[in-house]
Amino acid sequence: MSGILILLVAVPLMTAFLLSVTALPQKVPHTTLMKLRNVLSVSGMGVLCVILAVCAPAALSGHVLTYTVGGWSPFLGVSVLVCFLALFYSIPHMGYMRRMGKYDAFYFLMVAGIVGVFLTRDIFNMYVFFEILSISVFVLITAGEKKESYKASLKYLILASLSSALFLFAVGIIYASCGSLNMDYAAEGMKSMVEENPELMYVVFTLLLVSLGVKTSIVPLHFWLPDAHSIAPTPISAILSGIILKVSIYAMVRLFLLCGWQFYSEISPIIAYTGAATVAVGTLLALVQKDIKRMLAYSSISQIGIIVTGIGIGTDLALQGALFHVVNHALMKSGLFLCAGIIAGQSRTREISKLQMGAPGVAVSFVVLSLGIIGVPPLNGFVSKFIICYGAVQAQYSGLAFIILAASVLSCGYYFRVIQAFFKKKKRRKKTPMYRVSRFMSFPVYILAVLCVILGLFPLIGLQIADLALKMVGG
C-alpha cells in the first residue's frame, strides 16, 4: 500500500501536464476542449480522493505509511477535499481562463505542491514543493487578468522569493551542521546543535520563523495577503486562505519540533506573543473593511494568529486545539470565500453595505460558517478555540486567552455587519439580469457548512485528526 503514495504527487503533476497540452494552438472547437478539461480536472481530483480513501484506514489507525517521498499527513485529506470542492465551484466560474487552459494546469501544480509539502520527510524536498506552490499561486492570482491582480501577484512573488531565499539559507546551515536533510536524521543533529552551538540554532530558528512567517502571513509580515486574497478569483481565494496558509503552519510546527522540546520551550513564548499580535491586528483591520473579500482576508490573519498562539503556548492541549483549528478554519474560511463570491456576484458588488441575500441557501450557509468562525457553540470553531484558551490558562497565559476571546467578540461586529446587509431593503436602481447560481457553485458551500456542523457536534473526529498530526510531527 505504501507504494501508491508516490501517486499523490504524480497524479496532479501528470494532470497538470495533460491540461497544459490542451492549451496548445489546435483546430479543436472550444466546447470540445472545455469538456475535455472538465473531464481531466474532475478525474485527476477523483483519483487523488480514491488514493486517500484507500490509505485512510491505515493512516487513521496510527500506522505511518512510508515511501521515498515521506509519510501520510492527516491534514492531507482535508486539503484535497477543499481543493476538490473549489474545483467544482470553478467549473462555471472560470470560463475565460479555462478556455485558455492556464487555470487548470497551474491549479493542479498547486495541488501537487500542497501534497508534496505534507508528504515529504526531507527538508530540501519541502523547499522544492514550496517553490512549486509559490509559482503556481503567483500565476493563479493573475487569473482575473486585471491590473490590480498583476500588482498583487508581483507583491506576492517578491515576498515569496525572499521567503524562499531565507528558507534555503536555513536548509544550508542545517545540512552543514547535521550532514543530512532527512528529518529523522536531522532531528538528532539539531538536538546536538542546541547543546553544542545554541547561537547557531537561534539563527536557524529566526530564518525559519521569518521565512514561514511570510508564507503564513503573521504580523508584521502580513501585508501581501489582503491584496492577494481579495483580488484572486474566488476559488483561489478559498484555497489561499483555507489551505495554503495552513501548509506553512504545518511546516512551521514540523520543523520547530525537530529541535526537541527543550529548545521548543525556549522559543515558544516568541511564537505565542507573535500570534497574539497577529490576532489583534487582523481583528482590528477586519473591522474597518468595506469590501467583503478584504474583510475575510483580514479575518484570516486573525484566525492564523489564534493557531500560531496555540502553537506558541506549546502544551499538549494547546497544540491539539491549534491543529484542530487548522482543520476547522480550512473548512470555515474556504466556505466563506465561496459564499462571498456567489453573494457578490448576485449583488453586483463586493461592498458590504450593498450586498443582497440572493440565494437563501447560500446566505444561510454564510451565517452558519460565520458563527463557526466567531466561535458560537455548538459549531466547530467554538471547540477548537475553547481548547486553545483552556490550554493558555493552564500554561499561565491568561492574557493570551483574553486576547482570543476579545477577538472573537469583536469578530461579531464585522460578520454581523454582512449578515445584517442581507436583510436590509435596498432600492434597485435599474433592472439587471439575475446572477445565475450554478449547482457546481452552491454544492461545495453546502458541504463545507454541513461539515462544520458535524465537527461541532462530534468534535472527537477533529481531535483524532489533530492527535495523529501531532504524533506525526514529533509531538
Image (cartoon, rainbow, N blue to C red):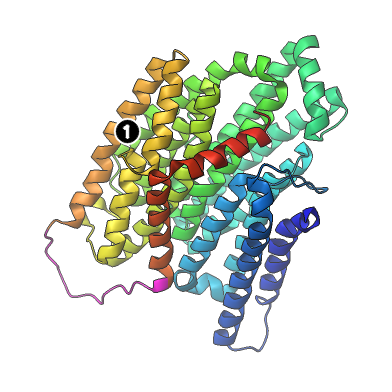
| Residue displayed at 46% across by 53% down | 238
Q: Which quadrant holds the N terminus?
A: bottom right
| Residue displayed at 18% across by 75% down | 431
Give the dominant element type of the magenta stretch: helix, strand or loop: loop
Instruction: Answer above or below: position of 388 versus 291.
Output: above
Q: Residues within 10 Å of mark 1 (few under 14, many from 20)?
A: many
The x and y percentages for residue 472 are 67, 36
Viewer-closest of 77 and 206: 77
Is residue 429 covered in magenta?
yes
Q: Is residue 211 left or right of residue 321?
A: right
Magenta-highlighted residues:
425-439
Q: Which residue is mark 1?
A: 408
The x and y percentages for residue 117 are 68, 45
The x and y percentages for residue 82 are 52, 56
Instruction: Answer above or below: position of 176 versus 68.
Output: above
| Residue displayed at 56% across by 85% down | 30
Residue 130 makes an appearance in the image = no
Q: Is residue 282 left or right of residue 222?
A: left
Viewer-closest of 38 and 131: 38
The x and y percentages for residue 200 are 75, 16
What element does badge 1 sit on? helix
Q: Is residue 337 left or right of residue 99?
A: left
Q: Residue furthest right?
A: 179
Viewer-closest of 250 and 58: 58
Instruction: Answer above or below: position of 153 versus 312.
Output: below
